[in-house]
Image (cartoon, helix red, strand yellow):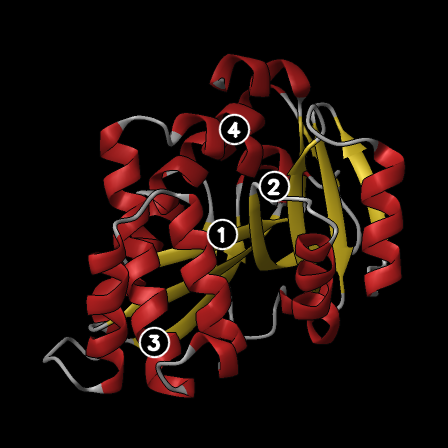
Amino acid sequence: MAGHNKWSKIKRKKAVNDARRGAQFTKLIREITVAAREGGGDPEYNARLRLAVDTAKSQSMPAENIERAIKKGTGELAGVSYEEVTYEGYGPGGVALFIECLTDNTNRSVADVRHALGKHDGSLGTDGSVAWQFDRKGQIVIDATRYTEDAVFEAAIEAGAQDVERDGDEFIVTAEPSDFSAVQQGLDAAGIEASSAELTRIAKSEIAVGGKDAEKLIRLLEMLDELDDVQKVHSNADIDEAVLAEAM
């Protein structure tokens, strides 16, 4: 598994506390609003919105919050206009970082991202400096304690998935973005419930990071994740298992 996938797993476990859940809700509301603005307010005909709504529901977001975010996106309710921006840079140990943001103030966003990078021995790069190191993919996480590997593999591959991999107590189903929705629907039809699903960026190759660099990288990832404007952070780091265990 890619290093940031391991970090994502830790983030899901940490998100059980109210403070982190509230921050996650803020990010999900922004994504729902932008998805509705770009593709309309009906999840049946807007794949991005459907994914955002499903993710929000999996995080136990109240239905009224979801509906309000959709209406802000479609203009039925007044709301803030968010812009999608990305930043590329480097973290401790020379790892590549691709940072996705939704913001109403790009000057604030770039300043916050630059500050976080600089504080933890990272640096902001130019557009295109690291994007080529990642592939855009859809990933679906499934609780391996609830379903057999054969059942998940058969349903996922039949629906068009590229790969199914076990990582501890989870199955990770990977698909091309164009097949992502069909794979989700195929798993649903087979009675297999996803713990999470997202369009993400997977590193083509990884850089092993250990010791002090790994510790600094985790602190950097945490600081970036805590920024309201930052939606997702992708890295090509294969983080030292011992350091990850301490972060748990």
**Residue 113 versus residue 33: which sits nearer the camera?**
33
Q: Which mark is residue 33?
A: none
Q: Quadrant of residue 106?
A: bottom left
Is label 2 in a helix, a strand or a loop? helix
Which residue is at 56% across, 40% downward?
Answer: 195
Q: Are marks 2 and 3 in contact (CB under 8 Å)?
A: no
- Residue type at mark 4 is Ile
Q: Which residue is mark 1?
A: 233
**Mark 3 neighbour class, 10 Å CA radius: few under 14, some 14 to 19, many 20 or more:** many
Disc on the earlier residue, 1 or 2: 2
**Mark 1 neighbour class, 10 Å CA radius: few under 14, some 14 to 19, many 20 or more:** many
- Residue type at mark 3 is Val
Q: Which residue is mark 3?
A: 34
Q: Marks 3/1: CA distance?
A: 18 Å
Disc on the earlier residue, 2 or 3: 2
Residue 85 location in percent, x, y? 40, 73
Instruction: Name the front one of labels 3 and 1.
Output: 3
Q: Which residue is mark 2?
A: 4
Q: Which residue is mark 4?
A: 10
Q: Are marks 1 and 2 in contact (CB under 8 Å)?
A: yes
